Image (cartoon, rainbow, N blue to C red):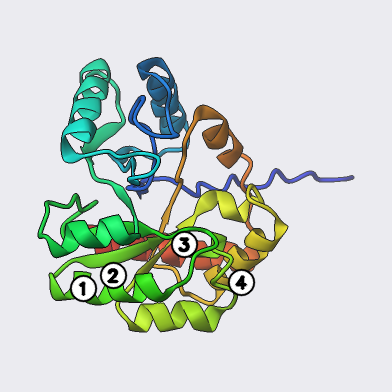
Amino acid sequence: MIFLFKKKKQALFKGLIDFHNHILPGIDDGSKSIAQSLEMLNLFEQLEINTLIASPHIYKDLYPNTPDTISNAFDLLQNAAKSHPVNLRGYSAEYMVDEFFMAEVNKGHVLLPCFRSYLLLEIPFFGALNILDEALFVLLNKEYLPILAHPERYTTLKNINQVKDLKQKGAKMQLNALSLLGYYGKDIQKKASNWLKHGVYDFVCTDAHNPYQLKQLHNLKLDKKELMAWDGLRENHLMLFNN
């Protein structure tokens, strides 16, 4: 007699608070409309993610958002999603670290943390790390806590020692779940898996820009070592968020 055992579903995202996503409609390269944002909310619910903090780009050359443009887009979506079970807890921004950003910081302009004093940062995918080092120093002195979004995706971050060096300088690291799926390519998938298993990440988020990407996350399956590391990462993510 042959017994067939159904593998237990990996509830990877259950209870996760996703603070890196592009669900706000019409202000960056994320959701194009309120209808698409509502579809994304349904897909977040299916992943068992029940709390979101929206984080549209602020990037002067492409997406010159301000606290006002972000607040207006958030209000539109929040009003349309009043009865939705996924909690739109608030909004922040994903800041491109460039000369414009550094000028804003040095002038003392209002910044939008994703929670408490944590600030979500990105750098150009092919850019040098010098300006990031400067940003970490300045932000920490202003009592912000920097989080570097998806370090596995930057070509200038080639090895784990570079990531550890940034962590020693005060940066937290946020993994894109899509990286583990190979969505951005095999090399990035390999880095993400290796760095996950070596414990360099502090947070994991979707960075979802559209419904298609969220549907892809339903296909994410982790091996035993990845799953063990993921469970520890998710626990750490929630601990840092809630403490």
From the viewer's side, name the closer residue of 196 and 149. Answer: 149
Nearer-N-terminus badge (4/2): 2
Looking at the image, residue 39 lies above or below residue 58: above
Alpha carbon distance from label 4 to label 3 = 15 Å
Residues packed near mark 3 inside 10 Å, few (<14), some (14 to 19) or many (20 plus): few
Residue type at the position of mark 2: Ala
Q: Is residue 223 visible?
A: no
* Residue 184 shown left or right of residue 111 in the figure: right
Q: Which mark is residue 138?
A: 1
- Element carrying mark 3: helix
Q: Secondary structure at mark 1?
A: helix
Disc 3 versus disc 2: nearer the observer: 2
- The kind of residue on which mark 4 rests is Asn
Tag of residue 135: 2
Q: Which residue is mark 3?
A: 231
**Marks 4 and 3, the one that precedes in the sequence:** 4
Mark toward the start of the polypeptide (3 vs 2): 2
Amino acid on which disc 1 is placed: Val
Instruction: Kindly check if marks 1 and 2 are in contact, taking CB atoms under 8 A apart as contact.
Output: yes
* Label 4 sits on residue: 194
Quadrant for the C terminus, please: bottom left
Q: CA distance from mark 1 to mark 4?
A: 30 Å
